[in-house]
Image: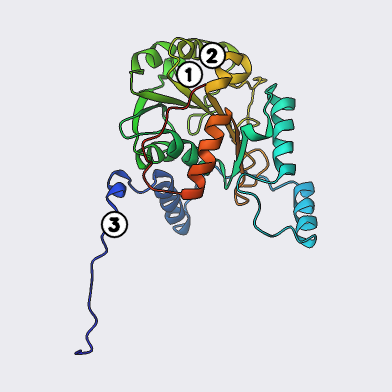
Amino acid sequence: MDGTTQQSDFRPAGRLGSIGVSEILKIGAAAARLKREGRPVIVLGAGEPDFDTPDNVKQAAEQAIRAGKTKYPPLEGTPELKAAIVEKFRRENGLSYAPDEVTVSSGAKAILYNAFMASLDPGDEVILAAPYWTTYADIVRIAGGTPVDVVCREENGFRLAAEDLERAITPRTRWLLLNSPSNPSGAAYSEANLRPITEVLLRHPHVWLMSDDIYEHLVYDGLAFVTAAQIEPSLKARTLTVNGVSKAYAMTGWRIGYAGGPKSLIAAMRRGSRARSPWPAPSARLQP
């Protein structure tokens, strides 16, 4: 041994080849640089609410800590939390879920990850209404799927047009991922806007719907929020309704996301979250 330090180049995993640096992180870095230069900046990067977590939530968390509720929870959330989520879906969305049709994870992003890892085989397609949160496409790719961008045109209020969705569907389409209100466009779907989308999905029973409702309570101009399984109950058997506490309750750092969906999908997500395998084994098709 001559005392010299051996150098070895790090070799990243091949699956990262299609994953770039987050555009949101780039925006945040650019904004931070401009602030350091003394420039006035409004940051349209990370979706951080401009209010604080409600006091009753803070107090409940303090009480839980003092009561010793700091141990490993069940993988999919405590029974009390799942019961509260079941009640939330009933009260606010008119959706009825059993506890084994509800899952909880460390943020809505983890819910999306678990769902795609549990359901996508290589080459399966996921339709994304563009513009969209950039992480959507990255998760699809990591899970072995193929993101299919469908541009939401300005003349349609940056909402997904039913005819564009129809054209994008192929035999390999596995999911439509729809975010309303949308990050980053802010486009939101009333029942009249959403109904044509559900009608297309009814004509294509092999396509499942992932409804990202994380911005549910950030609506304006008197818009009444609706979610797809609420207005079209026959789609509920192939819809994963995703939500969380980050935006509505300014709890971005608390990392609590949840979803309601078919028991078969929720069970597969539970298996996938245990393994956290970077590539899914060929999965059995989830039947509604």
First in sequence, mark 2 or 1: give its number. 1
Farthest-out residue, front: 284
Q: Determine if residue 145 is in view.
A: yes
Q: Determine the residue positioned at 47% across, 49% down.
A: 275
| Neighbour tally class for label 1: few under 14, some 14-19, many 20 plus, Cα within 10 Å | some
Residue under numbered circle 1? 157
Amino acid identity at mark 3: Pro
Q: Quadrant of residue 5?
A: bottom left
Residue under numbered circle 3? 12
Residues at circles 3 and 2 in contact by the CB criterion of under 8 Å: no
Q: Is residue 272 above or below residue 194?
A: below
Alpha carbon distance from label 3 to label 2: 43 Å
- Nearer the viewer's eye, disc 2 or disc 1? 2
Residue 184, position in %: x, y? 48, 33
Residue under numbered circle 2? 193
Relative to the observer, which residue lies in front, 182 or 273?
Answer: 273
Label 3's element?
A: loop
Q: Determine if residue 40 is in view.
A: no
